[in-house]
């Protein structure tokens, strides 16, 4: 009998390693750089650069640019740029930033102010707009 191999994740925010987390009662001032997934539930005042996904939860605030493999935003971001392969802006999000990504999704009801630049050979012609079907921001990610 062969050992069962885990099936690959369908969501880009699934990450088997522990995330670097900024808690809901925490304000972090400065740039955050690393290779682990980042989950922001509090306030980040500075840039975030990671070679893993970054999730900004509902109620969180970021005042700085984010560069990650994937970005999911349910909270507030005011930044110069958001750069990732995939960016998901959920219905509860308030985003003021320029987005550069291969895939961008914006939920119905989200506030977005900025520009969107789609990059890559298989990038769609523009952002995908969707209506969220889940309750709350803790559910699975589209994509």
Image (cartoon, helix red, strand yellow):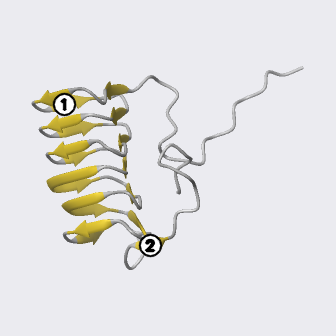
Quarter assignment of residue 42: top left
Q: Which residue is mark 1?
A: 32
Looking at the picture, how far across and down is residue 108, in whole percent? 43, 71
Q: Which residue is mark 2?
A: 128
Check disc 1 and report its element: helix, strand or loop. strand
- Tell which residue pokes out farthest to the bottom in this image: 125
Left or right, 33 with respect to 6, comes to left
Q: For mark 2, does the 10 Å Cα neighbourhood hold few (<14), some (14 to 19), or many (20 or more) residues? A: few
Quarter assignment of residue 26: top left
Q: Nearer the viewer, residue 43 or 142?
A: 43
Looking at the picture, how far across and down is residue 101, in whole percent? 32, 61
Q: For mark 1, does the 10 Å Cα neighbourhood hold few (<14), some (14 to 19), or many (20 or more) residues? A: some
Left or right, 2 with respect to 41, comes to right
Left or right, 97 with respect to 89, comes to left
Looking at the picture, how far across and down is residue 89, in whole percent? 37, 59
Measure how far apart labels 1 and 2 are at the Cα level: 29 Å
Residue shown at 23% from the left, 54% from the top? 82
Check disc 2 and report its element: helix, strand or loop. strand
Badge 1 or badge 2: first in the primary sequence? 1
Looking at the picture, how far across and down is residue 33, in whole percent? 20, 30
Q: Nearer the viewer, residue 135 or 28?
A: 135
* Residue 93, placed above or below residue 128: above
Disc 1 to disc 2: CB gap under 8 Å = no
Q: Nearer the viewer, residue 5 or 77?
A: 77
Asked whether residue 119 is in view, the answer is no
Residue shown at 44% from the left, 73% from the top? 129
Q: Nearer the viewer, residue 107 or 25?
A: 25
């Amino acid at each position: 009998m062969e050992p069962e191999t885990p099936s690959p994740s369908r969501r880009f925010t699934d990450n088997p390693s522990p995330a670097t987390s900024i808690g809901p009662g925490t304000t972090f001032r400065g740039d955050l750089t690393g290779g682990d997934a980042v989950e922001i539930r509090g306030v980040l005042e500075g840039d975030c650069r990671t070679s893993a996904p970054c999730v900004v939860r509902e109620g969180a605030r970021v005042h700085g640019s984010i560069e990650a493999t994937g970005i999911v935003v349910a909270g507030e971001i005011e930044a110069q740029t958001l750069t990732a392969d995939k960016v998901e802006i959920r219905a509860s999000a308030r985003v003021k930033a320029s987005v550069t990504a291969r895939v961008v999704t914006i939920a119905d009801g989200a506030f977005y102010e900025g520009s969107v630049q789609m990059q890559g050979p298989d990038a769609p012609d523009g952002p995908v707009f969707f209506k969220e079907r889940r309750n709350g921001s803790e559910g699975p990610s589209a994509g």
